[in-house]
């Protein structure tokens, strides 16, 4: 009986010592499994949401760029058809009206019609008429590389 009391005394003493040791530790050092799991799951969710948001934004950005390019190509085809009709009928009034209408569009700074030699035949800015561009000019370099024919689907820059 003496032995069992001594054993129970040692067990209680050891438990008190452990409880006192944990009571002295700061709260963040006494980690529990549920807090660890909560932290890991939270980090994974935040990382997943961040990555999916970045992917979604990049896809939407590319779709916006593609739709703007498609709209620019449609407008370019309409303008080209109108100008070809005016040129084939040799009607300068229709040609001037088409240039003025294009100039009125949002985002259009100026309109120039160049011949095969690079000379400006018609322009929305009257002082530019008759000027000549070489294939090496900054405006022409966007479409003509090394004096070659224009690159298919190239859209020249809007300003010099």
Image (tube, grey):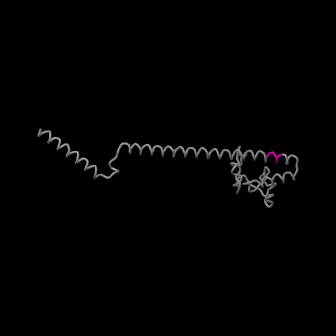
Nearer-the-camera pick, 24 or 59: 24
| Magenta highlight on residue 82 | yes
Count of marks overlaid on the render: 0
Nearer-the-camera pick, 3 or 17: 3
In percent of width and height, residue 158 lies at 71, 54
| Magenta highlight on residue 70 | no
Q: Main secondary structure of the magenta part?
A: helix
Nearer-the-camera pick, 149 or 109: 109
In percent of width and height, residue 52 lies at 53, 43
Q: Quadrant of the N terminus?
A: top left
Image: magenta residue range: 80-84
In percent of width and height, residue 33 lies at 36, 42
Question: At 52% across and 44% down in the image, what residue appears?
Answer: 51
* Residue 33 in the figure: left or right of residue 61: left
In percent of width and height, residue 40 lies at 42, 44
User: What is the residue that sits farthest to the front in this orientation?
Assistant: 1
Question: At 82% across and 46% down in the image, what residue appears?
Answer: 84
Question: At 77% across and 53% down in the image, what residue appears?
Answer: 118
Question: At 29% across and 51% down in the image, what residue appears?
Answer: 25
Q: Quadrant of the C terminus?
A: bottom right
User: What is the residue that sits farthest to the left in this orientation?
Assistant: 2
* Residue 39 in the figure: left or right of residue 97: left
User: What is the residue that sits farthest to the bottom in this orientation?
Assistant: 127
Nearer-the-camera pick, 29 or 150: 29
């Amino acid at each position: 009986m003496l032995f069992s009391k001594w054993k129970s005394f040692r067990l209680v003493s050891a438990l008190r010592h452990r409880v006192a040791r944990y009571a002295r530790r700061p709260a963040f050092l006494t980690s529990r499994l549920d807090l660890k799991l909560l932290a890991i799951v939270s980090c994974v969710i935040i990382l997943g949401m961040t990555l999916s948001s970045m992917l979604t934004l990049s896809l939407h950005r590319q779709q916006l760029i593609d739709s703007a390019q498609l709209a620019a190509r449609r407008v370019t085809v309409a303008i080209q058809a109108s100008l070809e009709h005016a040129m084939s009928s040799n009607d300068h009034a229709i040609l001037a009206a088409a240039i003025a209408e294009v100039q009125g569009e949002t985002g259009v700074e100026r309109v120039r019609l160049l011949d095969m030699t690079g000379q400006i035949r018609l322009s929305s800015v009257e002082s530019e008429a008759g000027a000549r561009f070489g294939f090496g000019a900054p405006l022409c370099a966007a479409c003509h590389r090394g004096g070659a024919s224009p690159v298919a689907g190239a859209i020249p820059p809007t300003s010099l």
